[in-house]
Amino acid sequence: MLPELSPAQEKLLISLADPEAPADWNNDVSAGDLLALLANAEFHGVLPIVLRKLRERGDAKLPQDVGLRQKLAELRDQMTMATGQSMLLQYHGDRIMKALAAKGVPARIVKGPVFARRLYHQPADRPFTDIDILVDPAGIEEANRTIAECGFRLGSGEAESHQLQEFKWLEKENSRLLIELHGNLVHDTGMRRRLSLGFPELQAIDGGETDTPAALLTIAIVHAAGGHKFHRLQLCVDVLQGVRALRSPEDEARLLEAARMTGIELELATVLNVTGRLFDAPRAIKLANRIEPDLSIRLAKWLITGNMLLRVNSREKLRSRLSRDAFRWVQRLARARPYPA
């Protein structure tokens, strides 16, 4: 269980987790406060951003505490290793993509390295622990054979992988290197009757371009609400950066059209609402409110709150888990909205 944070400490964590917020806070933050913040930041996947901001502030302005200094040194070494891991994963991802292209298998890398490069001014703020490759469902078998030929072994059950359209491949010589092959970024079969985000949908959203802001934010929303049920703050940071990447009303219109086409209007309204309220981002809330709310959206917004997300692994984790599980059932039971083909 994580060290419990006071409301003021939670507010500071959110500020430190925002890649574009200034590295500024009062001098009355103690070593114990910072150690608790670091533990929560590590759990929530925002540690690289927090460490960068502490470095920008300067160690001389931090509490002169031996335990804090030791912990910072340990975490900085850990982040150096994570950066190396990301670089190695990127190498293998590029190698597999070249092999897929040589066989004529349409594919694209999504999430991790693409988010780091396209959504974050400092890519090191967004390390990743795997490479996600999305292919057209018709190309899954050939893609699986290609990944195996590149020196990876299947680490997930074959029957379950086909059902989820998610195959987990581990490098034979280093099982910490994980490649995930997806036929659809929505893995829950109960939800897939209403929403879908696969290779064809992303191609349609991009409209002949690659990794447009609307496509990236759509992926971030599905990742937060469709895959992991808001289990850590990093998911909302990706969404926050995705909102900031929308440069024009045309980008916003493309995002909303993408939500209608893929069936993720419920998810978009919920994710943008909680992200906007957590990070005081009015534009995200305004975009969320452009989806006409029905009962399922109202219920989802009531269930998914900033406190629920921040306290995933606190003394209130049972309440958080119940809220997130209830949200999943709202997703499964929600009716699909009509979309003209």
Image (tube, helix red, strand yellow):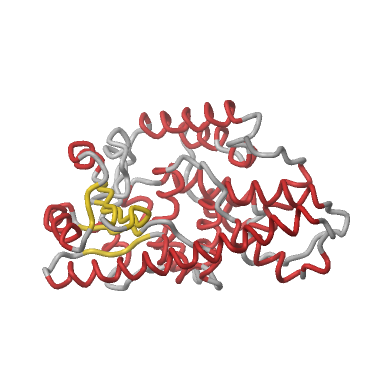
Image position of 32 (left or right of 192): right
Residue at image position (26%, 52%) is: 169
Residue reaching furthest right?
28
Image position of 76 (left or right of 254): right
Image position of 331 (left or right of 133): right
Image position of 205 (left or right of 225): left
Q: Out of 93 and 198, give the one closest to the viewer.
A: 93
Residue 203: percent from the left, percent from the top? 26, 64
Residue 27: percent from the left, percent from the top? 87, 59
Residue at image position (73%, 66%) is: 23
Q: Is residue 85 above or below residue 221?
A: below
Residue 125: percent from the left, percent from the top? 56, 65
Residue 301: percent from the left, percent from the top? 55, 37
Q: Tell me the quarter of the picture where residue 215 sits.
A: bottom left
Residue at image position (59%, 27%) is: 319
Residue 256 in sight here = no
Q: Tell me the quarter of the picture where residue 109 sits.
A: bottom left
Q: Is residue 216 above or below residue 236?
A: below
Residue 228 in sight here = yes
